Image (tube, grey):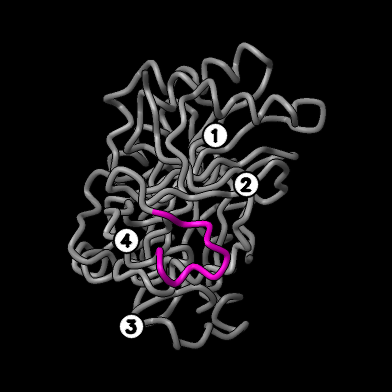
Amino acid sequence: MTRAPVNKIIPLSLVDGPGNRTSIFLQGCNVSCAYCHNPETQAVCNHCGICVSGCPSGALTIFNSRVKWDPEICRLCDQCIKVCPTFASPRVRNLSPEEVFQEIEKNIPFIRGITVSGGECTLYPNFLKELFALANENGLTCLIDSNGTTDFSRFPELMQLCNGVMLDVKAWDEQIYKKLTAGATNSIVKKNLHYLADCNKLEELRIVCLPGEVDAEVVISGIAQTIGEKACSVRLKLIKFRHYGVKGRLQNTPSPDDAYMQKLLQLAVGFGFEKAVIV
């Protein structure tokens, strides 16, 4: 049976795509972004057990050499994440598409669709395909929130079931991208820009803006040159960096000022992004 590690399911969300949606966050990521706002979703728990003894509610135990989480008594205090050497959350459920959809079904009268994020949800393409098939059968739209490092053209069946991708373009210069992501490359991200624009699956573009760390001006220009006239119809989110939740070298870095963000917005509009916004 196909399964994936589920970090959490938000029943109703207005910030993960158009309309009211159920958002599913999968555990595990293939890059390590310095500005990641939910680093607890990056690593998969290795069941070392360090978090168990310090759990104030006793919600964590060791069973068959694995950390077991009891959501019924958990206080969601995040002490387990604070003491974990890799900031991995042990509060993860290994669920099948059918089990996830059972939770989604409760929300169907109130939602337009589902959005699957992470971590990096495209690490589990078969899980996504089966989950999206169930959602499509019940009249729900399906979106993928992705870092773009998975080659979407390799999964035509998944893309047929998917209504669109919300793509995070972290940097344009490869060396800047590598520094930001601890060594990853952005060649597949750029390839995906072409592919998703050509097949009209580019739901939204996202740039986390932080001068000195992200070449946001070059990203805006590069995207515009890559997708051409499609820029006018794609929503572009210019996300002001905020240090909340960030771990590591950027955890105390201040946000860019409003003047800088307005400068980026005007640049984007000049390149034809009619749906550019600052968030």
- Of mark 2 and mark 1, the one earlier in the sequence is 2
- Of mark 4 and mark 1, the one earlier in the sequence is 4
Return the residue nearer the eye: 269 or 237: 237
C-alpha distance separating marks 1 and 3: 31 Å
Q: Mark 4 highlights which residue?
A: 49
C-alpha distance separating marks 2 and 4: 33 Å
- Of mark 2 and mark 4, the one earlier in the sequence is 2
Q: Mark 1 highlights which residue?
A: 143
C-alpha distance separating marks 3 and 4: 26 Å
Q: How many marks?
A: 4
Amino acid beneath label 1 = Leu
Residue 84 visible in image? yes
Pick out the residue farthest to the top.
Answer: 137
83 lies above or below 167: below
Report the magenta residues as a range. Answer: 52-61
- Of mark 1 and mark 3, the one earlier in the sequence is 1
Q: Mark 3 highlights which residue?
A: 249
Quarter of the image where the N terminus is located: top left
Is residue 70 highlighted in magenta? no
Question: Which callout, 2 or 4, points to the residue nearer the camera?
Answer: 4
C-alpha distance separating marks 2 and 3: 27 Å
Q: Which mark is residue 16?
A: 2
Amino acid beneath label 2 = Asp
